[in-house]
Amino acid sequence: MAGPFGAQSTTDEVLAGVDLSGKRILVTGASAGLGVETARALAAHGAQVVGAARDLDKARTATEEVRAQAANGGGLELVELDLASLASVRACAAALVAAGKPFDLVIANAGVMATPFGKTADGFETQFGTNHLGHFVLVNRIASLLQPGSRLVNLSSAGHRFSDVDLEDPNFGHTPYAEFVAYGRSKTANVLFAVEFDRRHKAGGVRATAVHPGGIRTELGRYMTPEVTEQLISSINAAAQSAGTEAFSWKTIPQGAATSVWAGVVAPADLVGGRYCEDCHVAAIEADPAVRGGVQPYALDPERARALWAKSEEMVGERF
């Protein structure tokens, strides 16, 4: 059943009565927050979860509850993945392909937010390189493991509304750097990647979607001071008041991970394929920047999605 679920729904509520026995699912960022909760919920319903993490020691400690709650044949294995290093990404993908075990679902959950200006091991701006390009290479390199009926879920954010992608200057070589502009670019890229991946693979029965988990207190906000967080929420609430919409409220981690599992295993594939989801439903297209919900039209633009794909291939030096 695809619903009715909403902003307050949790992973366990969304997956009530769902048997994932025999399903194999890859979750990136399985060492904290949403990644751990997503893995826990899926394994508790019988899925074999492969959790990817940069720090395996941290991930082993963080996922003790995942293994404890695994049921109906569910389980967890961990693999090393540093999305800020294409060498690590390619090594991880190569190992998964060599193992030859297909995936029913890939949840591209890992990411960073509002980091100071920096570069990945390959010279990409940190947020675009980690959030988008790392997943772009990983997913495309393991695409042969996605069989008909499989799905890709990219974690985006309402932060995509901060900025469209900049295909002329993706690394801020000429543009003044701003943390949330960079974050917005990377989160828009997550949606556009899902749009184009869906277009390329849906004839073969593989679908892709993007989701906004909501505002959750996790390690993702490690670079934000309390003052910056308060200013951001104040600006969101001011816009909400002028638009006549609800004020911002935090979600719990199980509520935040609910849309990922809803879009991945509960919602009909044709409903979510090529779309952007939030609060366990497909979001409306909303161009008004004063409205917090919905998805900006540029994030679903198919021509923009094709252009980003081509630019991403150029940047990573690989054609898919």
Image: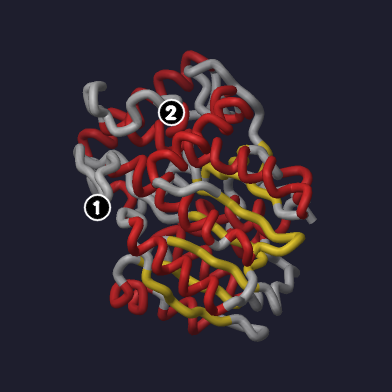
Q: Give the colour scheme shown.
A: secondary structure
Identified at 27% across, 49% down, the residue is: 122
Which label number is shown at residue 158?
A: none
- Give the residue pinned by disc 2: 165
Q: Secondary structure at mark 1?
A: loop
Quarter-of-image position of residue 311: top left
Query: Residue 52 location, x and y as percent?
Result: 43, 68
Identified at 43% across, 33% down, the residue is: 159
Q: CA distance from mark 2 to mark 1?
A: 21 Å
Nearest the viewer among 308 and 111 is 308
Identified at 51% across, 36% down, the residue is: 310
- Residue 279 in view: no
Q: 1 above or below 20?
A: above
Query: Residue 180 location, x and y as percent?
Result: 32, 31
Question: Total number of numbered labels?
Answer: 2
Disc 1 crowd, CA 10 A, few/some/many (<14, 14-19, 20+): some
Q: 303 above or below 316?
A: above
The residue under label 1 is which amino acid type?
A: Ala
Query: Residue 77 location, x and y as percent?
Result: 48, 79
Please name which of the two marks, 2 or 1, marks the residue nearer to the observer. 1
Q: Secondary structure at mark 2?
A: loop
Quarter-of-image position of residue 304: top right
- Give the residue pinned by disc 1: 121
The residue under label 2 is which amino acid type?
A: Val
User: Mark 2 near mark 1, Cβ–Cβ under 8 Å?
Assistant: no
Query: Residue 259 location, x and y as percent?
Result: 59, 50
Nearest the viewer among 266 and 306 is 306
Disc 2 crowd, CA 10 A, few/some/many (<14, 14-19, 20+): many
> Image check: 43 left or right of 221?
right
Which corner quadrant holds the N terminus?
bottom right
- Residue 135 in view: yes
Which mark sits nearer the N-terminus, 2 or 1?
1
